[in-house]
Amino acid sequence: MARTLSTLFSPFYAPIWILIGLFFFSYLKMLPFRYKLFIICIVFLFTIFIPRLSINMFRMLMRWSHLQLSHREHRHMPYLLTIISYVVCILLMTKMNVAMFIRGIVMAAFVSQIICVVLNAWWKVSTHMVGMGGLVGALIAFSILFFYNPLWPACGLILLSGALGTSRIILRQHTLAQVLVGFAIGYSCSMTFILLSWM
């Protein structure tokens, strides 16, 4: 169960989950379906497909196992490859004049990654929980912007965050402190960049 949760809620998927929620459960569902699909495909390509592909190629080149790649001292290159892909995604969305608050979602994930890279120099932060914190932060931020009550979705996401955090501890990938700090980073970045981008 712990492994399944960790796989389903990989930190790579956070921007996609936020966009799906925004495009299909807010007033943005009125946008043309082809446009929504196009934006989701771009974000999927640059925040999931390309980072995963490049990280797996790097892992095979270095002949590391998945477990070796999760060691703190080996995480710098995966972070760097992900950050480069995010930068390209943000530049492309800017070139296409995508709404600033939609770009804010990718910006929040990008800044979260940079914070994780800096902290990773001496401490291993849970990127899974950064992703979950980002989901909760985005939900609260958009509830403020679009004036809706986020109580039940927020309760569901917080319970899911607890289950995922517990899974990471059970799998001995992180300590409680690393889980909590990861959630706080994702939440604060998501809230900050989505609200600022709207302003």
Image (tube, rainbow, N blue to C red):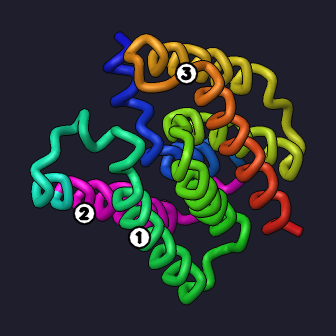
Picture coordinates of residue 130, whole percent (x, y) = 59, 40
Which residue corresponds to the image point at 80% horizontal and 23% vertical from the top-left?
A: 151
- In the image, 107 versus 57, the foreground residue is 57
Give the quarter of the figure containing the C terminus: bottom right
Cα separation, mark 2 vs mark 3, equals 28 Å
Magenta residues? 27-56
Picture coordinates of residue 198, whole percent (x, y) = 83, 66
**Residue indicated by mark 2:** 54
**Residue indicated by mark 1:** 85
Which residue corresponds to the image point at 41% horizontal and 37% vertical from the top-left?
A: 10
User: Which amino acid does the dot numbered 2 rest on?
Assistant: Ser
Residue 75, numbered label = none
* Callout 2–callout 3 Cβ contact below 8 Å: no
The local secondary structure at tag 3 comes to: loop
Residue 4 in view here: yes
* Callout 2–callout 1 Cβ contact below 8 Å: yes
User: Which amino acid does the dot numbered 3 rest on?
Assistant: Thr
| Magenta residue check for 28 | yes
Task: Say if 22 sits above or below 71 in the image.
Answer: below
**Residue indicated by mark 3:** 175
- In the image, 5 versus 147, the foreground residue is 5
Please tell me which of labels 2 and 3 falls first in the chain. 2
Residue 34 in view here: no
Answer with left or right where residue 118 lies relative to residue 36.
right
Quarter residue 125 falls in: top right
